Amino acid sequence: MGISLRLAEQFSAEEDGGGGGGNLVFSPLSIYSALSVVTAGARGTTLTELLAALGAPSRDALAKNAAEIARALAGGTATGGPRVAHACGLWHERTRSLKLAFRDAAAASFNAATRAVDFLANPEEARKEINSWVAAATENLIDTILPPGSVSTDTGLVVTSAIYFNGTWQTPFRKQDTKKDKFHLLDGHGTVDADFMRTGEDQYIAAHDGFKVLKMPYAHDHAAPQPSPRYYSMYILLPDERDGLSSLEDRMAAAGGGGGGEGFLSEHMPVRRVEVGEFRIPRFKLSFSRSVVRALRGVGVNAVFDRAELPDMIEGEPLRVSDVLHKAVIEVNEEGTEAAAATAVLMEGAARYAPPPPPREDFVADHPFAFFVVEESSGAVLFAGHVVDPTKS
C-alpha cells in the first residue's frame, strides 16, 4: 500500500502549521480500501490519479492486491491469534441503483456489502444507520463516522471501510514492572512523566544508521487451520536523535521512488532476537478524527473532488466525492494492542550457519518515535502513526 507513509507525511504537515508537533494514528488500510472501491467506478484522470496514489499500475492489479489483502486478514481469530475484522459497505440512495459491474467489482475486492437507504426523504436516518454499522464493525471504539449535517438529500452514495484489531503480545509485559520515567518532547520543549513498560527478555531489534527498529510480534496459533498463517507485529522506529523524528519520516517517505516507503520498512525489519540492555517503551492511547481531503490532494488525488469521472458507479447523474472522513483510535499497553478505524467517502451529484551473537542493544523509546501495525504475509499496514507525547491522546 504505497499511500501509507505519504499520507503520514501530509498529516504531519497539517499539524501546527507544518511543525509536526502532535501525536498521529490512522489506518492506511481503511483509507486504501475505501479508495479502492471508488477506483472500481472511475475513468480518465480520476482513475489515473487514484491508481497513482494507491501505488497500482492498473485497476486489475489493484483489485488483485485488494483481494490478496482481504484473504490475508480473513479467518483464524478464534484460534489464538489477533482478532481482526475488516468490512466495507456501499450505501446508495434507494431510488438509484448501483451499476452491476461496479457492485460486483466492489464485492470481489473487499466483500463490500450493498445497502439501499433513503438519503432523499430521510438523510438523518440514513446517517444513523451508517454510524451504527461502523460502531458494530469497530466494537464501539468508533461510535460515529458521519457527524450531523454530513449527509443530505444531495447524497447519492457513501462508501465505508472499517477495521478492528485486538492482539496480545507474544511476550506480554508485567504490569508491576511499569514505572514512571521522563519522555523528551520535540524541539526542547521539556519532558513529561510517562508510564514506561520494561522487560529484560530478548527482543527483535535492528540498529541502522541514525535509527533503530523494534519488532514486537503478536501472539498467534501455529496450528490454526488456514492455507497460510497470519502473522502480525508492531514496529517502532526510534531515531537516535531526540528531535530526529521528522528527518526519519522524511527519509521513509522518500524511499522507494514514490512508492510510499513500505520498502524502507521491509528493508530494515529486524530478523532475529538480541539480548537487551536497557529496554523501555511507553504505554500510549491515541485518536484521530478529520476530513482527509487535504491530505489526499497532497498526494495527487484532485479530480475526484473537482471534475470527477465516476460514470460507472450508479444509475443516473454521475457522482463526485464531496468529502472523505477518517477516524482512528489505538491503545498500546502491557497486554497488547486494541485499535479501530473507519473511513467514509461521501459522494453526491455533481540458516545452517550460526553467526556469533550480536551485541546487546538498548531500546529506550523516551523521545518521539514512529509506529506501524503490519500483517506480515501481505505487508498490509493496518495502522500507522507517531508518538510525540504519550501522555496525550
Image: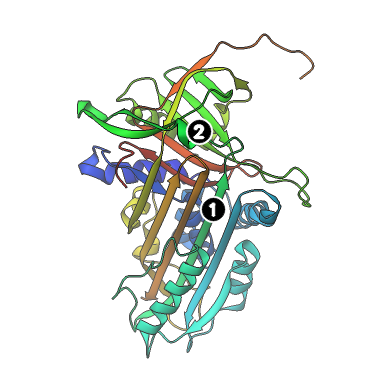
**Residue at horizontal 39 percent and vertical 50 percent from the top:** 300
Q: Residues within 10 Å of mark 2 (few under 14, many from 20)?
A: few
Q: Which quarter of the picture shows residue 158?
A: bottom left
**At label 1, which amino acid type do we have?**
Phe
Q: Vertically, is 231 above or below 338?
A: above
Apparent side of residue 206 relative to residue 239 in the rendered image (left or right): right
Residue 272 is at least partly visible in this image:
yes
Asked if one can make out residue 43 in the rendered structure from this viewpoint, the answer is no
Q: Position of residue 320 (x, y in %)?
A: 39, 70
The tag on residue 165 is 1
What numbered label is drawn on residue 256? 2
Residue 207, how many percent across, how many down? 50, 18
In this rendering, the answer to whether 331 lies above or below 344 is above
**Image: 188 above or below 66:** above
Residue type at numbered disc 2: Gly
Mark 1, secondary structure of its residue: strand
Residue 326 placement (x, y as % from top left):
39, 59
Looking at the picture, tell me which residue is in the foreground, 59 or 107: 107
Q: Name the image colouring.
A: rainbow
Q: Residues within 10 Å of mark 1 (few under 14, many from 20)?
A: many
Q: Report which quarter residue 17 is drawn in.
A: top left
